[in-house]
Image: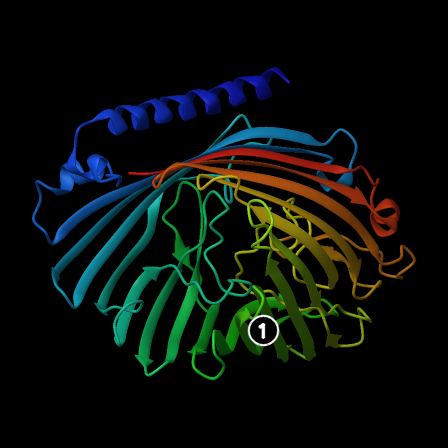
Amino acid sequence: MNRFLLTFLHAILITGLTMDLAAQRNNAETPESKAGGSKLLSDALNKNLPRWLRFTGEYRSRLEGFTGGGFHTDNEDFYLLHRLRLNMSIQPIGWLKFYFQGQDARVFSKNSAPYGPPFQDIMDLRMAYVELGDVEKRATGFRVGRQELLFGERRLVGHGGWLNTARSFDAVRATVHHNGYRVDAFATSVVNIRDGKFNESAAGDNLHGLYGAIDHLVPKAVLEPYVLWRLAPRLKTELGTMANLDLKTFGFRYVGKLPANFDYNTEVARQIGSVGTDDIGAWAGHWLIGCTVTRAPYQPRLIIEYNYASGDRAPLDGKRGTFDQLYPTAHDKYGLADQVGWRNIHHVRSGFEFRPNPKWLMMGNYHSWWLASARDGLYNAGGVLIAQVADGSAGRHVGQELDFQAVYSLQKQIQVSGGYAYLFPGNFLQKATPGKPYHFPYLMLNYVF
């Protein structure tokens, strides 16, 4: 507990210093402040540089911890995460850009040592690419090098930004926009993060894909079809031999707005392929409907959500039914505590969010989960198996979770947030593990400079 108090005071000190800096900058007489805007600290540097050269930065500090790790008694930890990013952009002409990002991610006061990913990776090159055109804003764009990939709601391909080390890809990406259509074509290999060594992608571990968007089929809606092809060497078959993965994912995402302030979001994906002699057949889906109550105080948004991902029904039959969530940004998709991922799961969620004023955002959610197959296991947000009873005798109800979060935007570039999740173990966790409840609190500061 003394260590927790020490790290907590450390986080508060950093937050206080940053707020004090922001207050000093707010009191400064600048055209931006008089106009109600905000100015980055890096602007003072950039104004003395050529217009084709720009520097920016990001700093994040997060205090987090847990009790009941692995649903075991006396398994707890509290630690402080720091992440610093330094960005450099070189754009000699409008259609040509070079971008670089260095990242320093560190963890303090954690129980386990030596530290490593996803908590620590001391100063490494996270992004370095050259871009022709603009993949986000222009009709065409071509980007090659180390970069982020973000598609749809990032349930299958994303940067994993909640993680202290986050994710990037060594990739080639081409984008075309035309008359309400968009398509991204890419060939990538995920970067393996290794603290103390230069991060490199692994040979043969590849993801290729086409991701589209059509925004004129239905008013106020976007359809996003996609095809993803993952290849990876040396995975185990169900009989334990080593073989290569050949996995194809076909799917779509459909998101839009309805009358009376309703909105919806759905995504369905089907997977086929093989691992050596094992055949793959899996699928997953996401369905959400929301409503903003404009006549109520603070105009709350209410949501109901259901997620499903198939599991494996017979572990040794040569047929793999567990859905592969690929490379997601999975934090808080299936619960704030991140003890559940998009694999072998039925997930029901209800929640709300509202803004007491423009600077505050408040959120609360209730979650309940069941295994899709009782003979398969429970996987966390990273896709890692954390509990299994192969004969299915532990039942299917995983448990329930309540979580709450608050976000305060001090300025456009300074944000403080915090949250707490409490997971109540269900019948499956009570039989497959010691069944201790899981607690997860956090306090976080984000600062862009």
Residue nearer the viewer, 390 or 379: 379
Rendered image quadrant of residue 86: top left
Front one among 121 and 249: 249
Q: Is residue 291 found left or right of 168 in the rendered image?
A: right
Asked if residue 433 is positioned above or below residue 207 in the image, the reply reads above
Q: Secondary structure at mark 1?
A: strand
Q: Residue at x 47, y 74 (%)?
A: 220
Residue with the mark numbered 1: 245
Q: How is the image coloured?
A: rainbow
The N terminus - image quarter: top right
| Residue 5 seen by the camera | yes
Amino acid under disc 1: Leu
Q: In the displayed orientation, state which residue is furthest to the front.
A: 295
Which one is nearer the viewer's eye here, 34 or 338? 34
Q: Which residue is at the far right?
A: 393
- Where 417 sits versus 293, above or below? above
Rendered residue at 31%/67% (across/down): 136
Left or right of 118 in this view: 293? right
**Which residue does the image show at 70% across and 68% down from the upper left?**
322
> How many other residues sit within 10 Å of disc 1, few (<14), some (14-19) or many (≥20)?
many
Residue 76, how many percent across, how many down?
68, 30
Q: Position of residue 351 (x, y in %)?
A: 66, 51
Specify the quadrant of the image occupied by residue 283: bottom right
The answer to whether residue 149 is left or right of residue 24 is: right
Residue 306 on image: x %, y %: 70, 64
